[in-house]
């Protein structure tokens, strides 16, 4: 079992009498910049003591049980034996997607085939369709970006072949996908160009709906989890993260919101 990856990500000291909010990040590297921003904002505006620590998913729920944290951000699939009274709040979903030119004839691909494409020296489209014998021109976002971290969360610490082209941002990736032989690896962006298509995995295409339901195989859904009904600073923070304004911002990070806002 992995040991807890426990370290302070950000810590703002406040007077001893101030409210304290301890946040646990068990997402294994999901883009949580907006959560960090709101934690900092809350600390500076209200004189609160805010800490954010990282946990291995296998240890995160126990940390909440032992009152080591007040709030967890964790993948939904790890929440199988949640104690009675714990409260879950759907937050966001992300997915590794395969972008191809709209003329690409491949109908679907499997996770094992994706691994083979990533690690092969010279993969060819002929392994997946009779209509093309071209080499697969693989493109991914550079290391350090949310895209490469998502790829590792989806396929582990595999070492992609060095011949894979790397680009700095999603706009650059879309430019190269204009080549019918190209295959791009990146998070889900609903506003991709019309000349680009999303390749189905196990016959299920990524979409806002399949990410929300979790039926697209490479989806990761995150929830906010706390021990009991939230109140005070904890409730304020959860409401901020699940606000209408946050629904508009999440797609900038390659994520979609999993909650609905009532008028």
Image: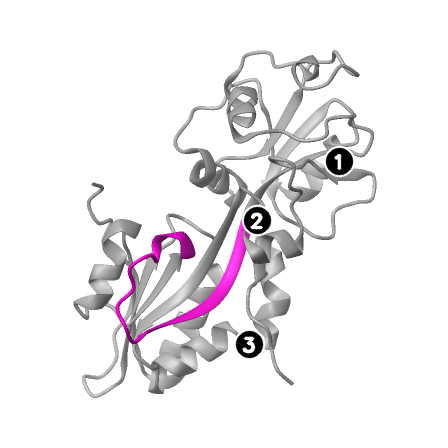
Q: Position of residue 254 (x, y in %)?
A: 59, 52
Badge 3 is on which residue? 243
Which element is circle 2 on? loop
SS at badge 3: loop
Where, quadrant-wise, is the N terminus in this rendering?
Answer: top left
Q: Is residue 80 magenta?
A: yes
In the image, residue 260 lies in the stretch drawn in magenta? no
| Residue for badge 2 | 215
Q: In front: 77, or 145?
A: 77
Q: Nearer the viewer, residue 45 or 255?
A: 255
Q: Which residue is mark 1?
A: 175
Report the span colored magenta: 76-94
Residues at circles 2 and 1 in contact by the CB criterion of under 8 Å: no
First in sequence: mark 2 or mark 3? 2
Verify CB contact (< 8 Å) between mark 3 and mark 1.
Answer: no
Label 1 crowd (10 A; few <14 / some 14-19 / many >=20): few
> Depth-wise, is mark 2 or mark 3 nearer the camera?
2
Q: Which of the 4 image quarters holds residue 212?
A: bottom right
> Distance between the Cα atoms at labels 2 and 3?
25 Å
């Amino acid at each position: 079992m992995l040991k807890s990856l426990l370290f302070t990500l950000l810590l703002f000291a406040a007077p001893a009498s101030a409210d304290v909010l301890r946040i646990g990040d068990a997402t294994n590297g999901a883009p949580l910049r907006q959560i960090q921003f709101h934690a900092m904002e809350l600390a500076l505006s209200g004189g609160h003591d805010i800490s954010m620590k990282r946990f291995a998913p296998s240890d995160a729920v126990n940390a909440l049980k032992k009152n080591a944290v007040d709030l967890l951000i964790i993948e939904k699939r790890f929440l199988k034996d949640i104690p009675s009274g714990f409260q879950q709040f759907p937050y966001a979903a992300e997915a590794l997607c395969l972008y191809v030119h709209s003329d690409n004839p491949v109908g679907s691909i499997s996770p094992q085939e994706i691994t083979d494409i990533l690690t092969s020296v010279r993969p060819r489209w002929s392994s997946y369709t009779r209509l093309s014998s071209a080499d697969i021109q693989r493109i991914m976002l550079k290391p350090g970006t949310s895209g490469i971290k998502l790829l590792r969360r989806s396929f582990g610490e595999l070492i992609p072949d060095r011949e894979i082209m790397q680009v700095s941002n999603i706009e650059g990736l879309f430019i190269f996908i204009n080549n019918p032989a190209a295959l791009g690896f990146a998070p889900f962006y609903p506003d991709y160009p019309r000349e680009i298509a999303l390749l189905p995995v196990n016959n299920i295409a990524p979409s806002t709906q399949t990410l929300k339901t979790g039926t697209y195989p490479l989806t990761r859904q995150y929830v906010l989890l706390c021990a009991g009904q939230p109140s005070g600073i904890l409730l304020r923070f959860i409401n901020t993260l699940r606000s209408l304004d946050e629904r508009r911002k999440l797609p900038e990070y390659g994520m979609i919101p999993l909650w609905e806002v009532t008028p």
